[in-house]
Amino acid sequence: KQEVTQIPAALSVPEGENLVLNCSFTDSAIYNLQWFRQDPGKGLTSLLLIQSSQREQTSGRLNASLDKSSGRSTLYIAASQPGDSATYLCAVEKWGGANNLFFGTGTRLTVIP
Amino acid sequence: NAGVTQTPKFQVLKTGQSMTLQCAQDMNHNSMYWYRQDPGMGLRLIYYSASEGTTDKGEVPNGYNVSRLNKREFSLRLESAAPSQTSVYFCASSPTGAVLSLHFGNGTRLTVT
């Protein structure tokens, strides 16, 4: 079974700092990898999707990279803002549909004004 | 746009009681999913419905039943609640069976005493 790990579990940074969140997975035969954001008491919102043939995706201040061979992905957040405070989860999808989507436990980010 | 709506938002049950969690989506999506989220663990798939009229087990189906009532609605039933089912439950939908475009509801926080 695919194992997805996110370290650290929690991170606090001052406003304006650039930061990197990490995601590692045990099986490199993946179809795609997604990064989600979860606000307290809310569901998950998709931020970025990287297909297996891609190495990175960018959206505004967010940049996600994927290194399948090493089983790692990073989410880079530039010039962090208090509104970025949330839990960030990665999810790895293998071929085969809903039973082959595996979520990490998330990193809870706090951006201090 | 309502998106994915879950009811209720909170529920407390006693061991052995039954209840149904409701989920409805207004995006004309074909596929719907039920996940549970527990501290220190990634989201785990309980059941899913790839299309109206079909349902399939996910990773943790024991103790649950589902009904795809129509294209919009997908309910999750606990016949005899157990403390191990204390969790936050999320319903999600996607346009097709591909999990690339998951849209989540805001969750139901269930406590079983």
Image (spheres, rainbow, N blue to C red):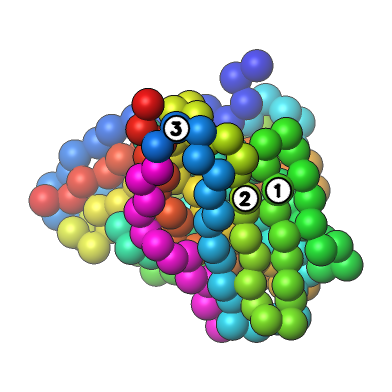
Q: Amino acid at mark 1?
A: Asn
Residue A84 falls left or right of residue B112: right
> Residue B76: percent from the left, percent from the top?
45, 47
Alpha carbons under labels 1 and 2: distance apart: 5 Å
User: What residue is pinned by disc 2?
Assistant: A76
Instruction: Tell me the magenta residue range.
Output: A1-13
Which of the two residues, B31 or A75, is positioned nearer the viewer here? A75
Alpha carbons under labels 3 and 1: distance apart: 18 Å
State which quadrant residue B16 falls in: bottom left
Q: Amino acid at mark 2?
A: Tyr
Q: Amino acid at mark 3?
A: Glu
User: What residue is pinned by disc 1?
Assistant: A63
In the rendered image, the vertical position of residue B68 relative to residue B61, given as above or below: above
Same chain for the residues at labels 1 and 2, yes or no? yes
Within 10 Å of disc 3 (Cα), the crowding (few <14, some 14-19, many 20+) is some
Q: Residue at x 55, y 44 (%)?
A: A18
Q: Nearer the viewer, mark 3 or mark 2?
A: 3
Q: Does B55 appear in magenta?
A: no
Identify the secondary structure beneath mark 1: strand
User: What residue is pinned by disc 3?
Assistant: A15
Within 10 Å of disc 1 (Cα), the crowding (few <14, some 14-19, many 20+) is some
In the rendered image, the vertical position of residue A80 relative to residue A69, given as above or below: above
Alpha carbons under labels 3 and 2: distance apart: 15 Å
Q: Is residue B44 visible?
A: no
Residue B86 falls left or right of residue A66: left
The tag earlier along the polypeptide, 3 or 2, is: 3
Q: Any mark on residue A41, and which?
A: none
